[in-house]
Structure formats: C-alpha cells, structure tokens
Amino acid sequence: MKVIKAGGHRLFEHDVETAATVSAMLLDLEKNGMDAVRKYSHKFDSWNPESFQLDSAEIERAINEVPEVAIEDTDYCQQNVRVFAEAQLKTLLPLEVNIRPGVTLGHRHIPVNSVGSYIPGGRYPMFGSAQMSIIPAKVAGVKHVTACTPPVRGKGYFPATINAIQKAGADSIYILGGVPALALMAFGLDGVPPADMLCGAGNRFVAEAKRQLFGRCGIDLLAGPTEILIIADHTADPFLVACDLLGQAEHDPNSGLCLITTSEELAVKTIQEVERQLKALPTRDVAALSWRDNGIVYLANSREEVLTLCDDYAPEHLELHTEDDDYFAERLSNYGSLFIGLETTVAYGDKTIGTNHILPTSRAARYTGGVWVGKFLKTCTYQRMTEAASVRTGEVTERQCMLEGMVAHAITAQVRVERYGKV
C-alpha cells in the first residue's frame, strides 16, 4: 500500500469542554423546564416566540410558501422512503417455536411509543432529514413523533422543512434547536410525551446531548462528520470520482474523504480533477478545507488489500467504481450504506432514493448499521410451557441454581416441581 495523499480521518472524540457545557445545560433544563428552554433559545438562536410549537394555521402558511415543484419532489422522495421502510417491516416477522415437548418460545416486534426527531438546520436546511427519522418510526407503528428543527435566523423557519416534517407524519412540530430541543423531547417539556427514543443528526452539542441522555431514553446512533470512501480501479472516470468526493466535502470542514485504488494513474488524475473542480465550486470555502485536511488517497497493491483498507476505515458511505463491483460488494463488511456502480451516488441516498441517510460514522460501521424501521422496534421474547415441561425444566433449573448458590431462585423451580409433579 502506498499513500498518494495523506489526510486526517477524525474519529468521534470526547470533547471535555463540550461535555461539561451540555451537562450543565441539561441539569438546568430538567430543573427549570420551559423557562430554561426559552433562555437558551434566546441566547443561542435569538429566538423567543410566544410558543415554540407551530399550530395548524402556521403549518399551513409555511406549506403554502413552498413552490409546487418542491412539494412534488418532496412527495417523490418521501414515497421512496416509505415504500422501502414498509418492505423492511415485512421482513420482521413474529416467531414461535416448540423447542422441546411442552416448551414454547417466541418473540414479537413491538414499536416504542414516543420518538423525538431532530431535523438539523445549521449550514444547510437539511429538510430531507425529516423523512429519514419520522417515516420509519411511523411505519414501525410509533404512536407519537415530536419533531424539532432549529430556527432560521431572521426568518423563523425554513418552509420546505415544515412541509417535509408535516408530510412525513410528525404529530407535533417545534421550532427549537440544539440542546434545548433534545431536552424538550427527552424530558417531555411543554406537554409533549417524553421520548422513548431520540433520533437525528446535529452538531457536536446535539451529539453530546444524545450521548448524555442515552439510558434515560434510547438513541439511534452518535453521528459525527460525514464520510465517503470510493473504491475505484483503472476503469473508473476521474471526473466522476472527484465529483463524488467533493459532494461530501461541502458538508463540513471535518468531512472524511477517502479514495482507494489499484491504479496510480487514476489516483493522480483524480487529485488533479478535484483541484480543478474546486476552483469553480460555489461551496469551495468548506469543501477545500475538507479536502486539504481530511482527503486521503491510497494506492493498494491488490484487491485483497483494498478490502482490508476499506473495512478498517469503515466508512459511512461507500461507492464502488470498478470493473467488478460484485467482487467487492460480496466481500466488504464495514460500511453504513453501499452505492454500487457509476449510476449511483451518495447524493441519491442522502436525498431521494429511499434508503436512510442517518448512518454510522467514525468507524461505528464496524458494529452497527444506520437508521431503519427496525430501530424503532423492540424484539421482545416470551415463553410458555405445560405442567409436564415445567417439572422437567424445574428439576434442571433447581440444580443449576443450587450450584451457583442462588437458593431463592432454586426454590421458585422446586415449588413447581413439587406442585406439577404430583399431577
């Protein structure tokens, strides 16, 4: 392996200062409720409305401000997400099996009752995030989804975001950002049902709030800066490879960008193409920093080494630009979402195609996938047995418990052996 271009791959680091700030805010918010919400919203976002929740008339006015083509396009995107989530749900079947005579075990998939969905709106109004957390939750059967999105300075809110949240199926919509939004949903402030699960991406304060609230409620995952890794060979088009790398570079100066190739010519041409495209890119002030600081290009000696390098990086988004995409698709194991072939690109997954864009970053793809309908379901087991089966199971259970010294456990089995063994 040879490094053609070196760069950083920032991991999701624990920031002590951010953690302390968020901890103090959460304590204040839990103690002082909406007074603290209002204080922080005014301090950080200059936003202090009479009510943070939009009523039906405000929602309708916001939607009326959205161009018809944008409404149609959002409907198109949301339909794709909904169809895919419904198809995923059909794969999650209840189970019941008789493992021994008289012993029946099973499981059911039960949705959580309440979800808090955070739709970010910092550098860009990420209204596409609405469908990514709300629709799978609703398809799963979640009864109540509270959606929070930060205010747009000087405007109140971004109308297309409100349209997307409403169409996705949120039960209440709040114009509120950052830690106060997470607190409102997790603690059940302002009369909303306390969230059983928090979902959605955000800045480092949002991510830290989710980390600290985990346990009190569930979370989808901790998402850091976005990442893309492209596997390309001599058949790849340097223009497309560079274009797709920059597509993620504009997200954040800390975006992770990586190219792994077996062709040195492709590597060199791609670097040249990135530099050329950057000159004309309107978002180059962000993208250029990301490419400079975090862009990595590896020249691998073999396809096997490509697999090793890629699985070690464990990218959020993984694209394949090779003459044998199936070879890699069948062997790779660590990625958030896989885009196979030149016809697909990360932007399709981010915005329109129907797979979810809330995905693991910072090498978390080694142990988890992204958000999907199953994230909002609890797989709960149950068991039942006949009297005869209880006697046989009880005899073994009693001996096992006594071997461990857990006498009270043993007694619960013993009394059943005595009761049902006489029948």
Image (spheres, helix red, strand yellow):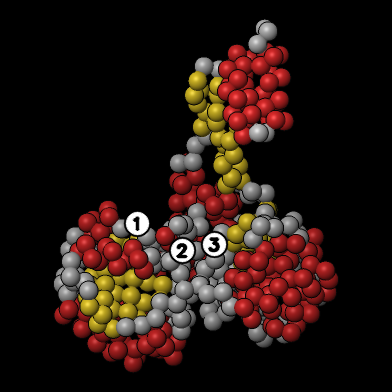
Circle 3 is placed at which residue position? 221
Is the residue under label 2 in contact with that under label 3 (CB below 8 Å)? yes
Question: Which three-letter amino acid code belongs to the residue tagged 2?
Answer: Ala
Foreground residue, 183 or 173?
A: 183
Among the 4 quarters of the image, the one containing residue 309: bottom left
Question: Which three-letter amino acid code belongs to the residue tagged 1?
Answer: Ser
Question: Which three-letter amino acid code belongs to the residue tagged 3?
Answer: Leu
Which label number is shown at residue 364?
2
Residue at x-position 55% and y-position 21%:
103
Query: Marks 3 and 2, Cα distance to the nearest angstrom?
Result: 9 Å
The answer to whether residue 61 shows anywhere in this view is no
Residue at x-position 77% and y-position 70%:
27
Marks 1 and 3, the one that precedes in the sequence: 3
Q: Secondary structure at mark 1?
A: loop
Foreground residue, 288 or 13?
A: 13
Measured as percent of width and height from the top left, residue 208 is found at 62, 71
Q: Secondary structure at mark 3?
A: loop
**Which quarter of the image is occupied by the N terminus?**
bottom left
Measured as percent of width and height from the top left, residue 9 is found at 40, 77
Measured as percent of width and height from the top left, residue 178 is found at 66, 74
